[in-house]
Amino acid sequence: MDVRLDALGVDIGSRSVEVVGLAGGEVVVSLKAPTAFDPAGQCARLLEGLAAGRTTATGYGRDLFVRTFGAEARLGVVATVTEIQAYARGAAHLFPEAHSVLDIGGQDTKAVVLAPKGRVLRFEMNDRCAAGTGKFLEFMATALQVPLTEFGAFALRGRRGLKVNSMCTVFAESEAVSLMGAGERPEDIALALHLAMVERLSGMLRRNACAAPLVFAGGVARNPCAVALVSEWLGTPAVVPADPDAVGALGAALCALQAAEMRA
């Protein structure tokens, strides 16, 4: 028997798929799975037993979702929304006082300035280069032979002083290997890599006049070193949701709910 929801939001990203379901204005379903090599199959497994009046998809796989599930009556009207809109709505719902959003995912980075009620005032997105994304940190963690989940805490043990000059993933990895060969502490190299990434991000934040309160979302928001350095740049702590990966799916569900209410 299906669990009946008012609205569903699905965020198909490069690394994970998140599903958020709303009923009575509250989150009653929150699910996650790796995107893997079969995002449609992962969605089908996550959505098993769920039904909604309206479903909105976001992320890289949003058009795939419509093609695959658009005719499923149990999902109601199936639509899409951009990641920018989804993250803006989700962040503003969680933190109504938020001024801006920084989302660092597996393969892109987004800086969004919010207008009232989660509307987008302006934004910038980097989805053409791994620099400044989760993929950059993943490559660097592999080069230093540190598990990705421990890389941020590892970097926080580093001392400042080293500098990584290139943000190209290939060249930065080469610099890291050279620094290791020169006998530098791996923790110091890890911190230098994080500093280089945040320095690049700071340009995006500065160009868009992003300011606190800033919601830090996406998978990299689980990295304590990245959070600490972004907070240092802001001059005040960045706001990290309890589940930073689910902000986009929450925003998509809120968009679905609003569309349903407008049609009622």
Image: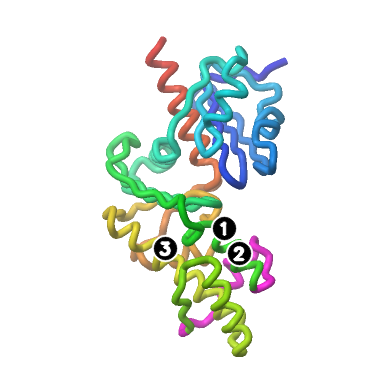
Which residue is under mark 3?
230
Q: Label 3: state its secondary structure.
A: helix
Of badges 3 and 1, the one in the foreground is: 1
Image quadrant containing the C terminus:
top left
Q: Observer-nearest residue: 151 or 235?
A: 151
**As displayed, is residue 249 above or below residue 218?**
above
Asked whether 201 falls inside the magenta stretch, the response is no
Q: In whole angstroms, how far apart are the C-alphas of marks 3 and 1?
A: 18 Å
Q: Residue 176: horizontal and vertical position, in percent?
A: 57, 77
The crowd level at tag 2 (other Cα within 10 Å; few <14, some 14-19, many 20+) is some
Residue kind at label 3, given as amino acid type:
Val
Mark 2 to mark 1: distance in Å?
6 Å
Q: Residue at x 37, y 52 (%)?
A: 214
Horizontal relation, residue 169 to residue 88: left or right: right
Q: Amino acid at mark 2?
A: Phe
Residue 155 lies in the magenta stretch: yes
Q: For label 3, count other residues whose C-alpha is less than 10 Å away and answer few (under 14), some (14-19) or many (20+).
A: many
At 31% from the left edge and 43% from the top edge, which residue is drawn?
114
Q: Is residue 9 placed above or below 200 in the rendered structure?
A: above
* Circle nearer the N terminus (3, 1): 1
Look at mark 1 in the image and give the residue it sits on. Answer: 135
Instruction: Using residue 52 as the reference point, say whether residue 127 is left or right of it.
Output: left
Q: Which image quarter: residue 147?
A: bottom right
Q: Looking at the figure, which quarter contains the N terminus?
A: top right
Label 3, label 2: how many angstroms apart (C-alpha)? Answer: 20 Å
Magenta residues span 144-161
Q: Which tag, 3 or 2, sits closer to the chain's start?
A: 2
Tag on residue 139? 2
Which residue shows up at 67% across the image and 40% down it?
Answer: 33
